[in-house]
């Protein structure tokens, strides 16, 4: 036992002097971002320091149906459920990596018997003896150079990345629900406009037919009125097709068929207030996909240390504790307790450059991850600026079309009055009514475009979506890793 104590003490002294962590320590890179977004002022929105105060941004539309649909999608979307499963896998693998840094202990056991026949006439004798043993087998490979610690860092970073990708998927799903909802509202509003126009056009057709029978209108006017009614009816087809596609897509997003959902109203909801989108630097902490790209860089950096640790010696400390009994079945049973403790050191000498090659590959993956991180941030800034430009253009177009609708309403009234007096032809009435319908539908589309641009803007700016946090690593694991 004295020798065993000396061996343990010697190993402890060796470990205290040799423990180190090879490989680079991760430090977040300093990425440059623009001081402000291009076109931010043109969008008409305030630009505070961040979007953190705008969780559940879709509530700004003031539509209870929309709020309920987004909540259903965040809870029941199948892609989000799959992302949660991937996150659970990554978290489990963090525990696996952390466990590999500790000792292992296994139980052992066995038994055997020996039967012998002793011939001693006139009576033979048979004797049976047995042996039984039970014990424990211990093994530990101290992480002398930090390769296993780097492996835990890499696994934890991967878990954070998957958590952030899950949150990014929640961001996209919430925005997609809003977009599909707005598409449905736009198409239903367009159908309502067509139905209202058809009612007016049928009344006009009846008037023209009466004037024709009275000899006050030509047959050409009747044909033109009938053609306009038919052409207006035909406008319903594309809207119905788009409506069916949007409803099907919305059902997929919420994770069900949506057959029991209340119908979306035929009016595009307006957003209350201006879009608060923050500054470009906010994307570093607001957009989950940007943060996920950084987590991937942290993982790749840790894997360099894993590869470098393979260059250094590896110490293994196996040991056993065995209790055995021999001579079972006889009067001479012998029991013994045996303990062993050993140490082995594997020293890499020659591998044809394979270990150095794995280090070079890990460093290349880290450089690639850094470039991907930068590209993700650049793309995020571009998405915000694109949404800002689209919002400014949509608002301008909506304002212009509102004026056009007002003017076309006046023109229809004037054309009908002049036609009734015989001062203008019926073609002028048809043109005025067609222009009014075109302007009305264009205004509905423009207002939907404004609402969609606001949704795109909030999604691009990384406005948070209420739900699980995106740390990806438990407190227990973080404490073990530090």
Image (cartoon, rainbow, N blue to C red):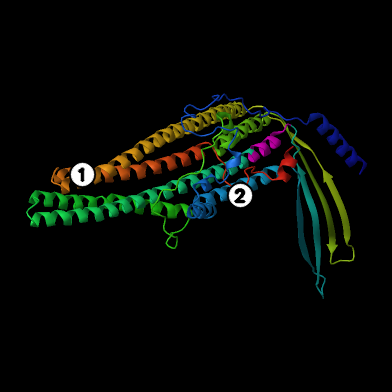
- Separation of disc 2 and disc 1 at Cα? 68 Å
Task: Locate residue 33: give its quadrant.
Answer: top right
Question: Relative to 373, is 124 on the left or the right?
Answer: right
Tell me which residue sits at (62%, 29%) in the image: 355
The residue tagged 1 is 415
The N terminus sits in image quarter: top right
Q: From this viewpoint, which residue is outermost toward the bottom? A: 122
Residue 46 spot, x, y in % from top left: 54, 33
Graded by Cα atoms within 10 Å as few (under 14), some (14 to 19) or many (20 or more), the crowding at tag 1 reads many
- Say whether disc 2 or disc 1 marks the residue closer to the N-terminus: 2
Residue plotted at (59% across, 40% down):
161
**Residue assigned mark 2:** 88
SS class of the residue under badge 1?
Answer: helix
In the image, 140 versus 464, the foreground residue is: 464
Magenta segment: 145-156
Percent of width and height locating residue 40? 49, 30
Q: Residue at x 32, y 53 (%)?
A: 192
- From this view, report whether residue 418 is shown above or below residue 196: above
Label 2 SS:
helix
Nearer-the-camera pick, 147 or 447: 447
Residue 19's x, y, as percent?
A: 78, 31
Quadrant for residue 17, please give it: top right
In the image, residue 268 above or below residue 17: below
Examine the residues drawn in magenta and state their main secondary structure: helix
Residue 404 falls inside the magenta stretch? no
């Amino acid at each position: 036992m004295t020798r065993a104590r000396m061996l343990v003490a010697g190993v402890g002294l060796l470990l205290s002097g040799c423990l180190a962590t090879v490989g680079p320590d991760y430090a977040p890179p300093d990425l440059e971002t623009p001081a402000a977004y291009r076109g931010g002022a043109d969008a008409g929105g305030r630009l505070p320091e961040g979007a953190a105060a705008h969780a559940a941004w879709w509530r700004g539309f003031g539509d209870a149906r929309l709020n309920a649909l987004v909540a259903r999608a965040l809870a029941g979307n199948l892609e989000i459920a799959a992302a949660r499963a991937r996150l659970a896998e990554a978290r489990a693998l963090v525990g696996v990596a952390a466990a590999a840094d500790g000792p292992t202990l296994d139980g052992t056991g066995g038994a055997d018997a020996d039967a012998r026949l002793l011939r001693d006439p006139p009576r033979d004798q048979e004797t049976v003896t047995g042996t039984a043993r039970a014990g424990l087998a211990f093994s530990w490979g101290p992480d002398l150079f930090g390769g296993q610690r780097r492996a835990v860092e890499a696994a934890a970073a991967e878990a954070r990345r998957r958590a952030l990708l899950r949150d990014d998927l929640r961001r996209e799903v919430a925005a997609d629900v809003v977009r599909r909802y707005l598409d449905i509202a736009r198409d239903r509003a367009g159908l309502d406009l067509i139905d209202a126009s058809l009612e007016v056009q049928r009344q006009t057709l009846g008037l023209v037919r009466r004037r024709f029978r009275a000899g006050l209108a030509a047959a050409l006017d009747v044909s033109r009125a009938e053609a306009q009614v038919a052409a207006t009816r035909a406008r319903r087809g594309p809207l119905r097709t788009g409506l069916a596609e949007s409803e099907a897509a919305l059902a997929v997003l919420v994770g069900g068929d949506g057959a029991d959902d209340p119908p979306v109203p035929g009016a595009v909801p307006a957003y209350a207030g201006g879009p608060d989108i923050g500054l470009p630097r906010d994307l570093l902490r607001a957009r989950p996909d940007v943060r996920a790209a950084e987590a991937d860089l942290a993982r790749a950096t840790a894997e360099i240390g894993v590869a470098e640790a393979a260059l250094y010696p590896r110490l293994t400390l196996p040991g056993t504790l065995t209790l055995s009994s021999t001579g079972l079945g006889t009067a001479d049973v012998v029991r013994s307790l045996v303990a062993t403790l050993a140490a082995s050191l594997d020293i890499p000498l020659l591998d044809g450059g394979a270990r150095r090659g794995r280090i070079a590959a890990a460093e290349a993956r880290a450089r690639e991850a850094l470039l991907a991180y930068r590209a993700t941030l650049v793309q995020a800034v571009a998405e915000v600026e694109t949404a800002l430009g689209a919002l400014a253009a949509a608002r301008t177009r909506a304002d212009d079309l509102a004026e056009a609708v007002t003017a076309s309403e006046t023109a229809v009234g004037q054309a009908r009055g002049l036609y009734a007096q015989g001062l203008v032809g019926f073609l002028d009435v048809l043109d005025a009514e067609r222009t009014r319908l075109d302007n009305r539908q264009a205004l509905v589309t423009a207002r939907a475009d404004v609402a969609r641009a606001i949704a795109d803007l909030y999604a691009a700016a990384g406005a948070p979506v209420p739900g699980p946090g995106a740390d990806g690593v438990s407190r227990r694991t973080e404490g073990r890793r530090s």
